[in-house]
């Protein structure tokens, strides 16, 4: 079974600053996918970014980027030029490659990110 | 597109009552999932389905049942509601393939009193 650990229950930064959220995972799988989801107060689950474990290049999506360290089983999310709308819970999630994703996502407990004006 | 639609959005049940949480998607996705989110925790998988007529247990299936008679619908049934089932329930769907993103509904907040 897989486990996902997010060690920062809450973080707070000023608007326009850069912030990094940490995530580590444990698995015996060699091929898998990692995700960051955002959950604003509206409770929606919104995909932020995705990383394929077989790719060495770190994924980027506009102001969001990841630092994927496969050997260390680490998957951190960096948010640049943070905005008030980034205030939300952020969840790191894992999915095995085999069975085509049928087994669903394994989530961490989340990090509550607060962007201060 | 409506995406994934969950009903109801809120519900209060008494201990021992039963109810069905509805989930429908209009994206013709093969895979559908039910998760629960307890306060301060991440989502945990209850049941999943890879297609009509096929369902399987996730990490926390006890106290729940599901069915998948059509591609679009994936209802979650609570037979004998218990306080431990107080949670927010999310339905999600995706295309086949581990790299495919899951699309989530807005959740159902359920309280068992």
Image (cartoon, coloured by chain):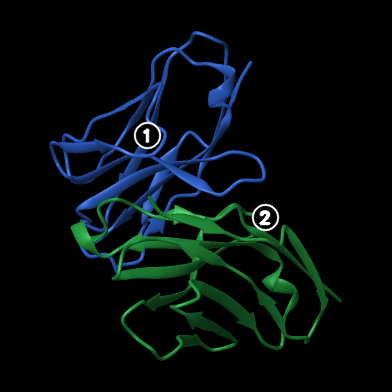
Marker disc for residue B22: 1
- Left or right, residue A88 beside residue B4: right
Which part of the image, by quadrant, shows the N terminus of chain B? Answer: bottom left
Q: Which chain is blue?
A: B
Q: Is residue B109 visible?
A: no
Q: Residue A67: where, in percent of width, then height?
A: 54, 83
- SS type, badge 1: strand
Residue at image coords 42%, 34%: B60
- SS type, badge 2: loop
Q: Is residue A25 visible?
A: yes
Q: Quadrant of residue B96?
A: bottom left
Instruction: Give the colour of chain A.
Output: green
Q: Which residue is mark 2?
A: A41
- Left or right, residue B41 beside residue B89: right
Q: Residue B26: where, in percent of width, then height?
A: 27, 53
The vertical placement of A73 against B105, above or below, is below
Marker disc for residue B2: none
Whether pointer 1 and pointer 2 mark residues with C-beta atoms closer than 8 Å, the reply is: no
């Amino acid at each position: 079974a897989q486990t996902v650990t997010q060690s920062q229950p809450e973080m707070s930064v000023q608007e326009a600053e850069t912030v990094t959220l940490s995530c580590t995972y444990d698995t015996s799988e060699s091929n898998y996918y990692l995700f960051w989801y955002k959950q604003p107060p509206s409770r929606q689950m919104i995909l932020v970014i995705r990383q394929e474990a077989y790719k060495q290049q770190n994924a980027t999506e506009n102001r969001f980027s990841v630092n994927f360290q496969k050997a260390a089983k680490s998957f951190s999310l960096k948010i640049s030029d943070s905005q008030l709308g980034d205030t939300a819970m952020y969840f790191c999630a894992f999915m095995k490659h085999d069975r085509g994703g049928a087994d669903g996502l394994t989530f961490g407990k989340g990090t509550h990110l607060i962007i201060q004006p | 597109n409506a995406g994934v639609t969950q009903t109801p959005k809120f519900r209060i049940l008494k201990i021992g009552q039963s109810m069905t949480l509805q989930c429908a998607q209009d994206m013709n996705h093969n895979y559908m999932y039910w998760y629960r989110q307890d306060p301060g925790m991440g989502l945990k998988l209850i049941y999943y389905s890879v297609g009509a007529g096929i369902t399987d247990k996730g990490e926390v299936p006890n106290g729940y049942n599901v069915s998948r008679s059509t591609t679009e619908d994936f209802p979650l049934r609570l037979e004998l509601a218990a306080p431990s089932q107080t949670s927010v329930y999310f339905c999600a769907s995706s295309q086949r393939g581990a790299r495919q993103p899951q699309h989530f509904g807005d959740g159902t907040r359920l309280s068992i009193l």
